[in-house]
Amino acid sequence: MNNSKGLSILSITFLLFQLLIPALGFAAGEFNPTETTKSDNSEKVAIKEIAQDENSITWKIWINQSGTENEGTVTELKLDSGLKHGQVLKRDEAKIEQTNQGYKIETVEGQENYEIEIKTHIKEIEKENFSMEVVANYSGEKFEASDRALNEAKIERDK
């Protein structure tokens, strides 16, 4: 009887840790993919929607999360047609400029990893979802990532 109680407590503890470990990684700022995020190499570049209100969507972009030595990167962010430029909330020493398509992010040579947050404004409030595409260029080699955000305000209005 005592063995089965001990085994039950151990099993429950193990299951709780399985649930908590991914949450701890997200709190630490690590990239955790969802069903809407895509990346051909999340160690090089990744993007994820992290916040949304009726007027804006905030995205987090990870560049060189692995900390691999590189000659600097140039990363292009392409805004969805339903979005427009907003504010750069966090830049981690990267050079960021607005382009017609979205943003251009340049990093310097080294092994730094970058976490960048950009808030975009919603210009087409009736659109069902919005996407952001990212292409990172590491010394001529390209890596792509994207995420899609459902328009939560529209979903609420349509209820």
Image (cartoon, helix red, strand yellow):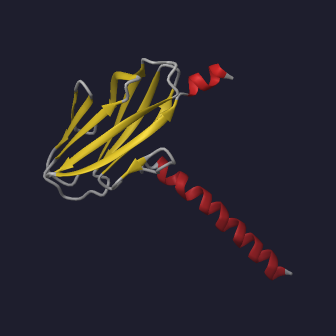
The relative height of residue 103 versus residue 73 in the rendered view (above or below) is above
Residue 48 visible in the snapshot: no
Q: Can residue 7 be seen in the rendering of this structure?
A: yes
Q: Quadrant of the N terminus?
A: bottom right
Note whether 108 is above or below 81 in the view shown: below
| Residue 88 or residue 42, whichever sits in front | 42
> Residue, x 74% and y 70% (percent of image)?
9
Q: Residue at x 45, y 28 (%)?
A: 57
| Residue 159 locus on image (x, y percent) | 69, 23
Residue 60 vs residue 106: left or right? right
**Residue 15 placement: quadrant:** bottom right
Residue situated in front as seen by the camera: 113 or 36: 36
> Residue 50, percent across and down?
47, 37
Is 124 or 1 nearer to us in this picture? 124
Q: Position of residue 118 (x, y in %)?
A: 35, 31
The structure residue drawn at horizontal position 24% and vertical position 45%, both measured from the top left corner, is 136
Q: Position of residue 67 (x, y in %)?
A: 27, 56
Relative side of 51 to 20, left or right? left
